[in-house]
Image: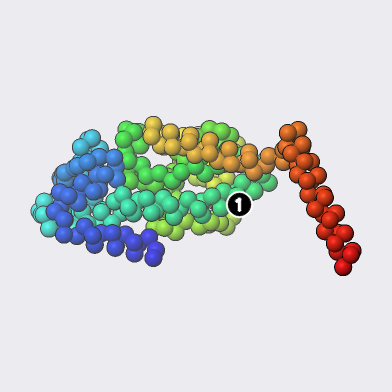
Amino acid sequence: MDLQEKAAEIVKKYENLPMRDKIGIIAQTFGCTSGKIKTSPCYGKWRGTSDMSIIFDNGVSLGIGNEVTPQAKSIKVQNEHINAVLARYNPEIVAAAKEAALVPLRKREAVDNAIAAEKGLKPYTVLNVELNDGTVDESSGYIGWYYVTLAVDGKIRAFIETGLAHSIASGTVSKTPTRENYFVAGALKEDKVDFVFNNVGFSSISDMYSLPISKDALERAEKTLAERSKAQTAEHKPPQKPSLREQLAAAKEALAEKPNTQRHQKDKGAR
């Protein structure tokens, strides 16, 4: 079952719930417990329509659509929008999207780092797949976007890019770079590029393609970085020479086995 089918199955479980409870499930995805729908009238060429959003109990706002004002205020239309949002933002589907993306991203890491080595750039380490919950004010414009925490030269960053966010949400992350030809990310200067992601040059010292990282996401990233560093060290660690005690024990065991071996050889010779 792909991610979209799984999302549809999950939503079926909630279809008979009151709208307030559905909003509560969405709120859990963003670290909250409840929320309410708010409509805001638009002006200019959008005059006559209203933006619809969920205001969570922490004050963070998640846009859910735009409709002609009378429809935006209709319970029926609001419920339709809530159902659509629930398919994308419920704890089960978000956890599944993160898990599905992590394996191919770590395989792609090796390919990207090989390209980076050829260009004299730095390797990166994939840490975690995260969903921006909007709790850091500077990142609220990207609420609901998936991003990846990376370590470049030991420094952790929250890496965000449009194609990456969409591929994680749709469960279509590729284990090999989707960019056939290498190029530098838009608006970045080539002399600032120091790592390669999806066969595209990025900069770990620039704020572009990066989000301010929340405390919780940073703690998870630090934990994963420590685990991956430990695993890589163990993988490349040379075999340890047995201690003197281990050598003596092995020698005693060999001596104990020797008479049995000799007896077996004598019995074999007698036959």
Name the one closer to the observer, 84 or 220: 220
22 lies left or right of 139? left
Image spot of residue 106 (x, y percent):
54, 50
**Can residue 45 be seen by looking at this rendering?**
no
267 lies left or right of 152? right
Residue 139 occupies quadrant: top left
Quarter of the C terminus within the rendering: bottom right
- What kind of element bears circle 1? helix
Residue 45, above or below 3? above
Name the one closer to the observer, 168 or 180: 168
Quarter of the N terminus within the rendering: bottom left
Image spot of residue 27 (x, y percent):
24, 44
Q: Residues within 10 Å of mark 1 (few under 14, many from 20)?
A: some
Image spot of residue 262 (x, y percent):
85, 54
Which residue appears at 16% of the width and 44% of the height? 36
209 lies left or right of 251? left
Name the one closer to the observer, 267 or 60: 267
User: Given the current orientation, which residue lies at the most extreme right position?
Assistant: 269
Q: Amino acid at mark 1?
A: Val
Residue 7 occupies quadrant: bottom left
Image spot of residue 112 (x, y percent):
59, 49
Task: Quickly name the residue at label 1.
Answer: 111
**Can residue 107 be seen by looking at this rendering?**
yes
